[in-house]
Image (tube, coloured by chain):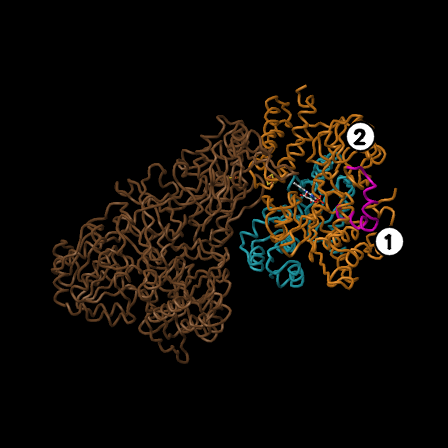
Chain colours: A brown, B cyan, C orange
Amino acid sequence: MTTKQVNVTINGKTVSVPAGITVVEAAKMTGVDIPVFCHHPKLEPVGMCRMCLVEIGAPMVDPKTKEVVMENGAPKIAMRPKLETACTNRVFEGMVVQTQTEKATAGQKSTVEFLLTSHPLDCPVCDKGGECPLQNLTMAHGPGKSRFIYDEKQNLDKQVPLGELIYLDRERCIQCARCVRFQEDIASEPVLGFDERGRKMQIVSLSEPGFDSIFSGNTTDICPVGALTTADFRFGARPWELSAESSICTQCPVGCNTTLNTRREAKAGGEIVVKRVMPRQNEEVNEIWLCDKGRFAYHYAESKARLTKPMMKKDGKLARASWDATTKFAAQKFLKNKKDFVVLASGRLSNEDLFNLKSLADTVGGKAILYSDMGGGDVTKLVGVGAGTNISKMGAGDAIVVVASDLYEEAPIWWLRVKQAAQRGATLIVANARETKLDKFAKHTIRYTHGNEVKTIHDLGKKNKIGDELAKAKNAIIFYGSDGLGVNGTSALASACGSLLKETGHVGRANNGLIGVWQRANDQGAFEMGFEPVADLEKALKGKAVYIAGADPVGDDPNLAKALKGAKFVAVQDLLETATTEIADAVFPAQAFTEREGTLTSGERRVQRFYAAVPAKGDSKPDFAITSMIAKQMGVILEGSSVRVVFDLLSNSVDAFADLNYDKLAETKEQFPIVGRSDMYYGGTTYENTKGLGVQLLPMAQVGGTVRIPKVRKEAALHPKEKEVLAVPVNKLYDYGITVSSAELLEQRIGETKIAMNSSTAKKLGVEVNNLAKISFDGVSGEAIVSIDDSVSAGVVLVPRSMGIAIREPIAAKVK
Amino acid sequence: MSLQQKYPKEIKQILSKYPPEYKRSAVMPLLHLVQKDEGFVSKESMQEIAGLLGITETEVGSVVGFYTLYQEKKAGKYRMQICTDLPCALRGADEFFNQVCEHLNVKDGETTQDGLVTVEHVMCLAACDRAPMFQEQGPDGIKYHEYMTIDRVNEWLQSLKQVETGEKR
Amino acid sequence: MSHILLRHREIPDLHKFNVYKKNGGFSAFKKAVTKMSPSQVTDEVKNSGLRGRGGAGFPTGLKWSFIDKNIWPHYVVANADESEPGTFKDRELMEMNPFQFLEGLAIASYAVGANVAYVYLRGEFWQIAEAMDKQIAEMEEAGILGDKLFGTDYSLRIYTHVGAGAYICGEETALLESLEGKRGQPRNRPPFPAVAGLFGKPTVINNVETFANVPMILANGADWYKSIGTPDAAGVKIYSLSGRVRKPGNYELPFGSTFRQLIYEHGGGVQDSRPVKAIMPAGASSSLIVANDKVLDTPIDYAAVRTMGADLGSASVIVLDDTVDLKWVISKTLKFFKHESCGKCTPCREGTFWMNNISKRMQNGNGVKNEDVDLLLNVAKQIQGKCLCALGEFSTMAVVTGIERFPEEFNRA
Ligand SMILES: Cc1cc2nc3c(=O)[nH]c(=O)nc-3n(C[C@H](O)[C@H](O)[C@H](O)COP(=O)(O)O)c2cc1C
Ligand code: SF4
Ligand code: FES
C-alpha cells in the first residue's frame, strides 16, 4: 500500500508527509512537538482541549483562474485569521504551519493557564508526577505565576473509586475525554461518561460492578494527568524511581508486549519487585493496549506459596534436598521406567523449556504430552497466518471467521482488534453454539448445535451467501477455539478450518490463515517443539513415570489425581506449591517469567523475547535448566545455562525456526504512532519498544512446502440419556487459575462458579435460577450457581473451565 | 412497577419516531416520561431505559447529568423555577424571586415544609416580555406562569393545594 | 402593513387547522410537491434573498443546495431551541401560527428530498410540543403529511423532539448530538451537517422563523419577498424586544427599520422615559452598542449592525437605560454562560468559570478593583478566537464591549 505524500512547511521547514494525517502527527514526524491533551493518535480527533493551537496557512488561489497566486517565485500564503487546532486539521499540499509564533505560543500558554485554574498543584504527591503531560507542558508553556485566586478554585472529590481497579481524582481531571473515548470507540464498552456539564463536568461510571470493562487499565495510560490511577499502583512508587524491563504477557496466546516497571522495596525486604505492568508498543500484536488480566494478574510470581528449594520424598514425606540429590533421584527413577517415561508440560513454559523437555523425552524414548484440552497445532503449523499479519490493517474487503471461541474471554486483545477490523468494514462471521460478545459486531452470526462445528465449517465452503463472501474476501483469517470442545473436537475443527482456508486460497500470505485461540500463552510453541495434547490423559498417565512441568493436573481434575496417584513416579517443576507438588516424589522450584529470559510463540506464531526483570526467588532455576540437570544425570546432554544457546540449538533442529536467531527477535523498527520517547504526552505513558518486535514463523503454506491437512475422524455425536444433559466446557477470562486468583484485585471479578443453560432446560431439570445446583459426570461432581442464557441450546449446560469443576470436553452429565 | 408496564403505549410511540438502528435517540423523551412520573430520575429507571435502548447505564446517566430538566434527586412535588436571567431581571425578576422566597419561607433551592414546592433559579425561558414569570415542573409536565405577582403566586399555590386535597382535579 | 409571519395578529384562531387552511394554508406546499421540482423550490428560496433567522444570517436557499446528493437519506431539522436570553419569537410563532412554520418545514423537506423531519424544541416548550404533535396529526389526517402526498411519490413525516434545558443545544451540531440521544456538545466541523448531520446523514437545519417565511415566499414569489427589506437582508424580521421598554414583545418589521422605530413607535418608549444607554441587539451574546442618535436612526440589517460593532444575531433586542449598571449586566450574562457552557472545550469551560468569579467579586460591594477589570478583560480576550463553538466567544462579547465602550462604568474613564 503506497500512500500519497504531500509537502507541508512546518516552522519554515518543508517536508513530505503522508496525505491525510493530522498536523500534530506531521509535526511529530518531523521532530516538532505540538503540545496536546485531548489528542491521542489512536482516537478520533475531537479538538476539545485547545492545547494544540497553531497558525495554519494555505496557498492563495485566484478565484477566477483557479490558479495558485505566486509571489517572488513561491505560492502566496494566506494565513487563517484564527488559531487552529493542529489535532483536527489534516495536512494538504502546500500547507504552512507555524507552531512557535508569538500568537501560537500565546494560545498554547492560555490553554495551560486555563487548565491550571482548576487543577490542584499537588505534583509532589501525584502518581503521574514525573511522567505528566500537564506538568511537562506547564514547565514548557505555562505562566510563571497564577493570576487566579486560589480560594475560588473548585473543590472536588479525590480518590473516587470508579470500580475496584481504577481510582479517579476529580480535581486532577482536565476533561480531555480520552478515557471516555477509549471506552467508547476502542473498547466498545462505554461505561465511563461525563456527569454534569461546564466546569462541573466530571467522570463517572454507573456500571455494576464499577467501571465494568476488561480494558479499564488502558485509560490510566492514556490519561494525560494523574486523574486516573490503578488501585494496584497508586501511591506505589514515583515514576522516576522505576526501572523498566521488556517482557511478554503470559496470560493468553495474543502475546502482548509489556514493560515491567520494577523498584527495590523496603516492604519486600529490600528486594526488587514488579510495581506495575505497562503496555509496550507492538503495532502488529497489541498496539499500545493491554487487557486488565495481563496488567493486574502478575502478582502470582510474588506469592507466598512460591517454591524455593528442591524437595524429594523420603519415608513418604517431601523434604528439602539439594539440587544434586533431587535431580539424581528423579533421573534414576526415569531411567528405571524408561518405557513408561512421560513428559507432561504446559504452554506456560518458554520455547526453550519445551525444547529441552521434548529433546529429553525423544532421547529417552518417552512421550511428550501438552497439558491442554485443545488440539490442532499441527494444522496451524501448516496454514497458520502468514508472516506480516497485522489485524489492524484488515478492513473492508477482508473477512474474519471466529468459530467455537469466545474471544472476549479467551484473548481480549484479539477480540478488540477483530472487533475494530469489523468496524472498519471487514466481514466478521461469528459461529458458535451460543451468543458471545462478538456477535454484536458480526455481519453474520451462525448458531450451530454442539457437535456440528465441523459441519458448519464445511458448509462455509459450499456455495451460499456467507460462503461466497468468505471465498471472495481479499484476505481471510479464521480463529478457532475450544469453546464447547475438547481435544478431539478441536483437532477435527482445526482440520476443517485448514481445508477451508486452503480451498479458498486464504493461506500462505499475510493476513490469511488459521489462528488457534489456545488456552495458554505458549501452546503454539509447544506444538512447534513437537508436543501434542491427548484426549484421554487419564489413561496416558496411569502407571507411568511422569515428569510434569508448569501444570497442576491433580488440583484441576480428580480423575487425573487418581491417575497420578497410580503413577510409578511423579516429578514436578513449578513456581508454586500445588496439589500436584503435594503428591509428587520430587519437586523442583522453577523461576517465574519475570525472573528469567526466554522466548514464547504467540497464536499468530510470532516468536518474541522476554527479559529478566527481577532477581530469582530462592534457589529456583529456569525450567530448561532444571531439565538439563535431570537430563545430565540420565546421561543426556542438554544446554542448561544459556537461553541463547538453547535457542540456537532449537532453531537448528526445528525447521520452522530455521531462519531465526536470538538477536533477530530483539530487532525493532520505526512504529507509527510514535509513543514514549522524551515527551511522554503524545501517546500517554506507553513504552516505546526498544527490545524487539519478534518474528513471525512462516507457515508451511508460505514456505512452499506441501500442505497436507490431516484428516481427523469425526467422533460419534454424544447423545445424553433421558434425565441427562450435555455439559460443555467454556472458557472464562477471570477464573480460579493460579495466575489470576493470586491477584487480590481481580478476586471480585472472578465471582462464583456459574453454569448456564436456557430457561426451558432449567425448568425441565427443576433447578432454580441463581441458586446452587449439583452437577456430576464421569467421576467429577461439583456445585455451581445456575444462570440463564437463552442462546444456549436446549439440553445443554455450559460449564466454565478452571472454576472448580473439572471438565475437559463435552460430556453427558446430571444436574440437580 | 416498571416503565414498560406503566407506559407501554407511550414507549412504543416514542420509539416509532426514530429509525430502529438509532433508538438511542429515544433516551430524552423516555427520561421526560420518568421525570414527570417520579419527579426525578431514579437509578432503576435509568437502568430500565438503558436496557430498552441497548446502551449502558452510564450513557443514560451522563445524559441525565447534562440537562437541567432532569433531576437526580427528589424535591418538592412541584418545582417553581423562576427566571432571573438578564431580560427578566431588568423587569424585576430578582425582587420577585426574593419576595417568593420570603413568602414561602425558603431559600434558593429549598422546598416548602409541606413538601409541595421547591423554589429554584433558572435561565431565560423565552418569556422575557412577560416577566416576572416562572415555570412549574411537576406531575403535569411543564407549565408557564407569566406576568406574576405575589397575589397570583398565591392563587396558584391555592389551586395546587386543592389538587392535593382532592378538591380540584 | 399586515404581517407576513405574525399573521395571527390579524387572523384570529390561525393556530387552528381549518382557519389556517381557509386562509390559503398548505397551498404552497401542495404547489411545491405537485408542480415544482425540488431544485426549483430551492432556487425560489435562493432568489428570495431569505437569510437564516437563527443568528448567523446564512442564505437559506444556498444552505439547502449544499446538501450532499450522494449520501441518503436526508433529514431536515427545525431549530426550535430558542434559548438565547431575550429571544421569544419562535415561541409566539409556534403557539399562534404553528401551521405556517410546519408548512415551511414541509416545503424545505421536499426541496432537499427528506422524508423525515424533526422539530427540536427546548424542553421548556413542553406544552408547545404537545400541541404540535396534535397539529402534525391533523396534517397527517388531512393528507398533508404521510405517504404519497397529493398523489405523488413524495412522503414526509414530521416528529417533535423535546430537549431538556441546555442553551448549547441551539448550536446546530450540539442539537444533532442531543437529537441522537447524547449530551448536547458541539461537534467538530468539518464535516458540516450538509454532509454528515443527523445519524451521520446529510441534514439541513434552520430556525423556526426561517421556515415560517418559506410558504409566503412560494405563494407570492421570490421577487415579492425581495422587494421587502434592504439589499443586504430581504423581507421581514421578528424583533423580540425586551428590557427597559414600556411595551416589550415581538414586533415584525421589514429590514431597514430603525432601532428608534422599534423602541419608540412599537415598544412604547423607555420605562420612566429614561434615555437609552445601550442596546444589546442579539440577546445575552450580544455586544453592547452605545446608543446615540446615529445608532437609533440607522436602518438596520445585518451589515448595518456590524458597523455598530455588533451582530444582529436573532434580533433579540435588550434595551438598557441609564439606570442600569453594566457591571451587573455583565454579571448576569456571565452567570448565564458559565451555567450553559457545555464543558467540552477548555477556554470556554474554564474561562466562563473564571470570568464569573471575577465579576462576582466586582459585585460584592468591595468596590471595583482596577486589577480585576484588567484581568476580566484579559481573560475574555484570552478566550476569544480559541473555542470549539461560538458559545465561548458569545460569553466575552458583553464583557469586552462593556469595558471598552463604557469605561466610566468600570472606573477607568
Ligand atoms: C451557542 C449557540 C446557540 C444557538 N441557539 C440557537 C437557537 O436557539 N435557535 C436557533 O435557531 N439557532 C441557534 N443558533 C444558531 C444555530 O447554530 C444555527 O446557525 C441555526 O439554527 C441555523 O438556522 P438558520 O440558518 O435558519 O439561521 C445558536 C448558535 C450557537 C452557537
Ligand atoms: S465554546 Fe463552550 S459551549 Fe462551545 S464547545 Fe466549547 S465549552 Fe462547549
Ligand atoms: S484540541 Fe488539539 S489536542 Fe486537544
Pinpoint residue A49: horizontal percent, then vertical percent.
53, 39
Quarter residue C261 falls in: top right
Q: Is residue C338 magenta?
A: no
C6, above or below A799, in the image: above
In front here: B92 or A40? A40
Disc 1 target residue: C23
In front here: A451 or C115? C115
The C terminus of chain A appears in which quarter of the rendering? bottom left
Q: Earlier in the sequence, mark 1 or mark 2?
A: 1
Pinpoint residue C387: horizontal percent, then vertical percent.
59, 37
Residue at 69 percent across and 47 percent down: it is C122
Disc 2 target residue: C298
Mark 1 CB near ligand 1 (8 Å cut): no
Quarter residue A655 falls in: bottom left
Question: Label 1 amino acid?
Answer: Asn
Q: What is the CA distance from the residue labelled 1 to the residue labelled 2?
A: 36 Å
Question: Label 2 amino acid?
Answer: Thr
Question: In the rendered structure, which segment of residues is drawn in magenta?
Answer: C209-231
Left or right: C374 with respect to A648?
right
